[in-house]
Image (spheres, rainbow, N blue to C red):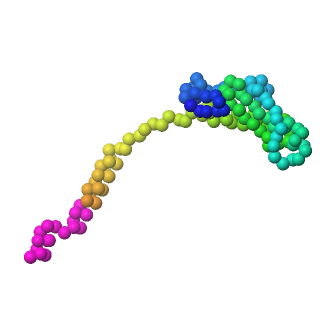
C-alpha cells in the first residue's frame, strides 16, 4: 500500500495500474485545479498574484503542487509533468527475480579448498606424540 495524502492506493496488481491520457488537455480534465498565492521572495508581486498551482488527479487521488515560476501557465505545465512522473513511478513493476542455484562443481571446489586448508592447519599444530617426547 502506498499512502498519498489521505487516500490509499493498492498497487500490487496490473489491474491497479493508473492509465493517463496522452494529451495534457485531457489530463487536465481529469484533475481538479487550484491556484493560490506563492510564498517566498518577490515582495508585493508575490503577495498579489496567484501563480502557484495545485493539481489533484481525481481517479488516483494524487496531489502535486508547483510554485517555482512567476507564471501560472508555467507552473501548471510543471505540475502536469510532475504528475506524469509520479504516476510513472507508481506504475513501475520490477522484473521478477529468477532465483539461481550454486552449481554442484562450485560446491565441490569450495569443499576441496576447505579440506586442503584444514589439512594444512592440522599439520601446523604439534601432534600428541611430539608433545610426549618433549616432556620426557
Q: Residue furthest left?
A: 136
Quarter of the figure that contains the N terminus: top right
- 123 versus 8 height, above or below: below
The residue under the point 37% across, 44% down is 102
The one nearer the camera, 73 or 1, is 1
Q: Quadrant of residue 15?
A: top right
Quarter of the figure that contains the C terminus: bottom left
Percent coordinates x, y for residue 86 in the rendering: 67, 35
- 131 versus 82 height, above or below: below
106 is within the stretch colored magenta: no
The one nearer the camera, 10 or 93, is 10
Q: How many marks?
A: 0
Q: Left or right of 14: which side holds 86? A: right
Percent coordinates x, y for residue 76 in the rendering: 80, 34
Q: Quadrant of residue 64?
A: top right
Q: Left or right of 5: which side holds 112? A: left
The range drawn in magenta is 119-136
The residue under the point 12% across, 75% down is 135
Percent coordinates x, y for residue 48 in the rendering: 89, 39
Q: Left or right of 119: which side holds 100? A: right
Let me know if residue 77 appears in the view.
no
Percent coordinates x, y for residue 75 in the rendering: 81, 38
Q: Left or right of 112: which side holds 70? A: right
Amino acid at each position: 500500500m502506498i499512502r498519498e495524502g489521505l487516500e490509499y492506493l493498492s498497487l500490487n496488481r496490473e489491474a491497479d495500474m493508473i492509465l493517463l491520457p496522452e494529451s495534457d488537455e485531457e489530463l487536465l480534465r481529469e484533475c481538479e485545479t487550484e491556484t493560490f498565492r506563492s510564498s517566498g521572495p518577490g515582495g508585493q508581486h508575490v503577495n498579489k498574484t496567484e501563480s502557484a498551482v495545485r493539481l489533484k488527479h481525481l481517479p488516483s487521488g494524487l496531489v502535486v503542487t508547483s510554485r517555482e515560476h512567476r507564471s501560472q501557465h508555467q507552473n501548471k505545465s510543471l505540475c502536469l509533468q510532475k504528475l506524469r512522473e509520479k504516476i510513472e513511478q507508481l506504475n513501475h513493476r520490477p522484473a521478477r527475480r529468477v532465483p539461481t542455484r550454486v552449481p554442484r562443481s562450485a560446491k565441490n571446489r569450495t569443499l576441496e579448498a576447505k579440506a586442503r586448508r584444514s589439512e594444512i592447519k592440522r599439520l601446523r599444530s604439534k601432534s600428541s606424540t611430539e608433545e610426549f617426547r618433549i616432556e620426557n
